[in-house]
């Protein structure tokens, strides 16, 4: 019951050649804010592309769960970021607060709720968290990925192009290498072979080192990596020189 999130409205982000300049733009310049990244991987598609969410570095805030119950939480917690990020992404989040556990129960996202052993969970920088979303605080540049699946699932991680603080990456002008890792719930990281990489209309398969080489596509496009039995990874990629790319 530690980390399930619920979103009521069905909102999906188009993949492929979708323009997503917000995911590559600067985040808040307010020194009181910590600029963090949020994304949501649904059971069959990405629901929210990685994008900036500015959370307060200190203090608390009062929020209401889906039943209207008032709760005081850390302003820089994963839960606070989720509430801000889904609101900005126009994805409603439904959740319940359980006082006996001092923790939220995330019911559904985009009307997608728990099914059997699968439900909504999160990782911070691909790393498994054993605490509830209200008890994990974020630092500058932390990346939170919510995913639908088993709590202890192995997740895919796009390590290159740049797995860093920015939501997206800049590539080109020549061919670039995609490097994919698998990260277990015990935080063991290994190269992911035979993963499918989709970039625009291009599809490639990673080799034994978890790598695939792709030719850049003009503008901003979505890079998505999938593999059976693994949680997918998604990243906006901008081609160097494109007017949409950050300078």
Image: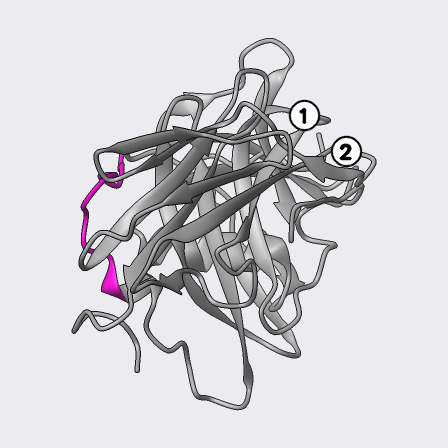
Q: Which residues are magenta?
A: 11-21
Looking at the image, the residue that sits furthest to the top is 116
Above or below: residue 155 compared with residue 220? above
Residue 148 drawn at (x, y percent): 52, 27
Residue 175 image position (x, y, % from top left) = 35, 53
Q: Is residue 25 magenta?
A: no
Query: Are there few (<14), some (14-19), or many (20+) residues within 10 Å of tag 2?
Result: some
Q: In the image shown, does 60 or 147 lie closer to the viewer?
A: 147
Residue 182 badge:
none
Q: Is residue 217 left or right of residue 193?
A: left
Is 89 placed above or below 101 here? below
Q: Position of residue 138 (x, y in %)?
A: 66, 65
Q: Which residue has dot 1 on it?
A: 153
Q: Are marks 2 and 1 in contact (CB under 8 Å)?
A: yes
Q: Is residue 213 above or below residue 78?
A: above
Name of the residue lying farthest toward the front: 174
| Along the line of sight, the residue nearer the viewer: 75 or 11 | 11
The quadrant in which the C terminus is found is bottom left
Spatial CA span between label 2 and label 1: 6 Å
Viewer-side residue, 124 vs 5: 124
Residue 51 in sight in this render: yes
Residue drawn at the location 48% of the way across and 56% of the way down: 161
Describe the element under mark 1 as helix, strand or loop.
Answer: loop
User: x, y (%) of residue 158?
Assistant: 53, 46
Where does the N terminus fall, quadrant-wise? top right
In the figure, residue 22 lies in which quadrant? bottom left
Disc 2: which residue: 185
- Residue depicted at x 19% and y 47%: 18
Q: Residues within 10 Å of mark 1 (few under 14, many from 20)?
A: some
Principal secondary structure, stretch drawn in magenta:
loop
């Amino acid at each position: 019951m530690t980390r399930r999130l619920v979103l009521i409205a069905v909102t999906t982000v188009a993949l492929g050649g979708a323009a997503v300049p917000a995911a590559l733009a600067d985040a808040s310049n307010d020194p009181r804010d910590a600029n963090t990244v949020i994304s949501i991987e649904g059971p069959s598609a990405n629901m929210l592309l990685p994008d900036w969410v500015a959370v307060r570095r200190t203090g608390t805030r009062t929020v209401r769960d889906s039943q209207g119950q008032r709760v005081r939480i850390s302003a820089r917690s994963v839960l606070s970021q989720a509430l801000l990020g889904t609101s900005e992404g126009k994805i409603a989040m439904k959740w319940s607060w359980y006082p006996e556990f001092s923790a939220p129960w995330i019911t559904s996202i985009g009307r997608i709720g728990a099914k059997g052993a699968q439900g909504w969970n999160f990782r911070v920088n691909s790393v498994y968290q054993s605490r509830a979303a209200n008890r994990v605080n974020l630092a500058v540049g932390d990346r939170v990925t919510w995913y639908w699946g088993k709590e202890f699932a192995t997740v895919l991680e796009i390590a290159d192009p740049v797995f860093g603080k920015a939501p997206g990456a800049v590539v080109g002008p020549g061919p670039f290498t995609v490097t994919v890792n698998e990260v277990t719930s015990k935080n063991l990281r290994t190269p992911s072979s035979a993963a499918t990489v989709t970039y625009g209309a291009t599809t490639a398969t990673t080799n034994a080192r978890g790598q695939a080489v792709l030719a850049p596509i003009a503008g901003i496009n979505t890079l998505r990596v999938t593999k059976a039995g693994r949680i997918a990874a998604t990243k906006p990629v901008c081609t160097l020189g494109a007017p949409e790319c950050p300078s």
